[in-house]
Image: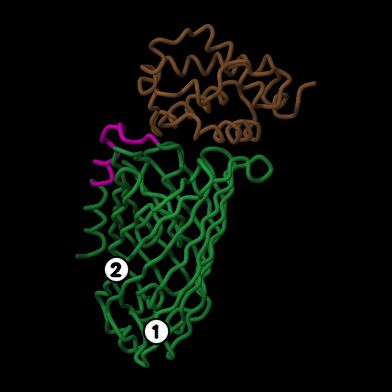
Chain colours: A green, B brown
């Protein structure tokens, strides 16, 4: 389906969700986070332990998001939807489309995500919120990954994440810290396929976010994401971003970032911007 | 002498204004209002002013029952707890309490979570 048509289909869904009643939003503002680029509640490039939307126990919620990132030689468009149930379970789906401008082609990928809150809480009690997550990814355009000697067109990432909002944590400002440990065999998060023809195994990588809330509505922060670098044919480097998030109310969230993705598919130093708009139920 | 947090919240007079604004928010909060059906609001106001002032660092001393005793048997849900936190945030915003003082007070009150919810 052409990108433009799919965006046209998502737009009414965004509007429909925003028009639904606001009954199921008993968590505090911004505690639903943004929708990270794999479609899960988080920052821009890192999933957090929080459950998508603002639903508490016995409620449900969720988010739909449209995201675009543009770096030197690539453009990434993402449409994502996630559902959070009882502040315990999260299910999500993202369709990613990577435009490779020098080659005039694109690579699409489906990401099916699930997350389970295991223990703790973002705000209250002694334990930070701990969640286990997984992402099943299926690359729909395997020609380029195959030519780079990726082994497989699909793969599973699984991770453990811990998130905490420290009230008055820094100079009286609330501070969010989040850390995830991920087992992955994805090359460039799966956009360049999974594994390597030489049989390289999956690796554990770390990823984290730190954000400072200037007030209830605005947060600025940084993120870092390690990458496995399995392919011999092209280098893969860690990702990083500097982000600003805006949560005017519980219906809308906006995340903008400057991203540094390192070399991708042999093209050096990919830097640029990232913008994600989400509507919450 | 007033401590930093109380002073940053507007002193004892400021705390009284926060509580009064909070009671207005509470009176419009359908999620938690039923919990106060049998509450003596005048006494609640007086004890809450003491509690907030005490929690902010004094000089007042809270003279009411412990948080655990006060909320025992009420089965207050997480959603209701969050709703009260939001009422308090709106009250502090209305009284123009600086963000840092708001967060410090919320941090100290959040520590009471386990003595309030699901008892």
Left or right, A1 with reference to A104: left
Specify start and end residues of the magenta stretch as a single range.
Answer: A13-26
Quarter of the image for residue A203 reads bottom left
Q: Check if mark 1 and mark 2 are on a common chain.
A: yes
The answer to whether marks 1 and 2 mark residues whose Cβ atoms lie closer than 8 Å is no
Quadrant holding the N terminus of chain B: top right
Q: Are there few (<14), some (14-19), or many (20+) residues within 10 Å of tag 2?
A: some
**How far across and how far down the image is residue A252, in percent?**
39, 42
**How far across and how far down the image is residue A35, in percent?**
39, 54
Quarter of the image for residue A156 reads bottom left
Give the residue drawn at x 25%, y 60%: A4
Give the residue drawn at x 34%, y 43%: A280
Give the residue drawn at x 55%, y 49%: A176
Q: Earlier in the sequence, mark 1 or mark 2?
A: 2
**Nearer to the camera, A242 or A113:** A113
**How far across and how far down the image is residue B7, in percent?**
73, 24
| Residue A201: mark in rendering | 1
Viewer-nearest of labels 1 and 2?
1
Q: Residue furthest right?
A: B1
| Residue A136: mark in rendering | 2
Q: Secondary structure at mark 1?
A: loop
Q: Chain of mark 1?
A: A
Q: Is residue A138 magenta?
A: no
């Amino acid at each position: 389906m052409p990108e433009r048509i799919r965006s046209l289909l998502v737009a009414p869904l965004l509007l429909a969700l925003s028009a639904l009643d606001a009954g199921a939003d008993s968590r505090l503002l911004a505690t639903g986070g943004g929708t990270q680029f794999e479609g899960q509640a988080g920052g821009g490039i890192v999933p957090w332990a929080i459950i998508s939307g603002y639903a508490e126990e016995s409620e449900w919620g969720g988010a739909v998001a449209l995201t675009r990132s543009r770096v030197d030689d690539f453009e990434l468009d993402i449409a994502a939807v996630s559902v959070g149930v009882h502040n315990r379970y999260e299910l999500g789906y993202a369709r990613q489309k990577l435009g490779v401008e020098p080659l005039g082609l694109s690579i699409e990928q489906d990401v099916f995500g699930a997350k389970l809150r295991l223990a703790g809480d973002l705000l209250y009690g002694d334990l930070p919120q701990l969640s286990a997550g997984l992402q099943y990814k299926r690359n729909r355009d395997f020609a380029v990954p195959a030519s780079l000697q990726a082994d497989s067109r699909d793969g599973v990432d699984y991770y453990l994440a811990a998130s905490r909002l420290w009230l008055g944590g820094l100079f009286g400002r609330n501070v969010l810290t989040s850390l995830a440990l991920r087992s992955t065999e994805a090359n460039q998060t799966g956009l360049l396929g999974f594994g390597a023809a030489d049989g390289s195994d999956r690796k554990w990588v770390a990823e984290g976010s730190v954000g400072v809330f200037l007030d209830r509505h605005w947060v600025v922060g940084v993120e870092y994401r390690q990458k496995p670098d399995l392919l011999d044919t092209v280098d893969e480097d860690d990702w990083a971003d500097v982000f600003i998030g805006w949560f005017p109310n519980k219906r809308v969230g906006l995340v903008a970032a400057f991203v540094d993705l390192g070399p991708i598919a042999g093209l050096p130093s990919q830097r640029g911007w990232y913008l994600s708009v989400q509507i919450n139920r | 002498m007033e401590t930093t947090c109380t002073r940053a919240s507007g002193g004892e007079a400021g705390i009284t204004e926060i509580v009064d604004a909070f009671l207005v928010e509470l009176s419009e909060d359908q999620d938690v209002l039923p919990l106060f059906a049998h509450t003596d609001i005048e006494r609640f106001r007086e004890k809450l002013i003491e509690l907030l002032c005490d929690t902010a660092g004094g000089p007042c001393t809270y003279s009411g029952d412990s948080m655990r005793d006060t909320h025992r048997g009420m089965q207050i849900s997480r959603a209701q707890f969050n709703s009260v936190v939001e009422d308090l945030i709106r009250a502090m915003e209305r009284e123009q309490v600086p963000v840092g003082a708001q967060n410090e007070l919320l941090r100290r009150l959040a520590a009471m979570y386990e003595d309030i919810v699901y008892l």
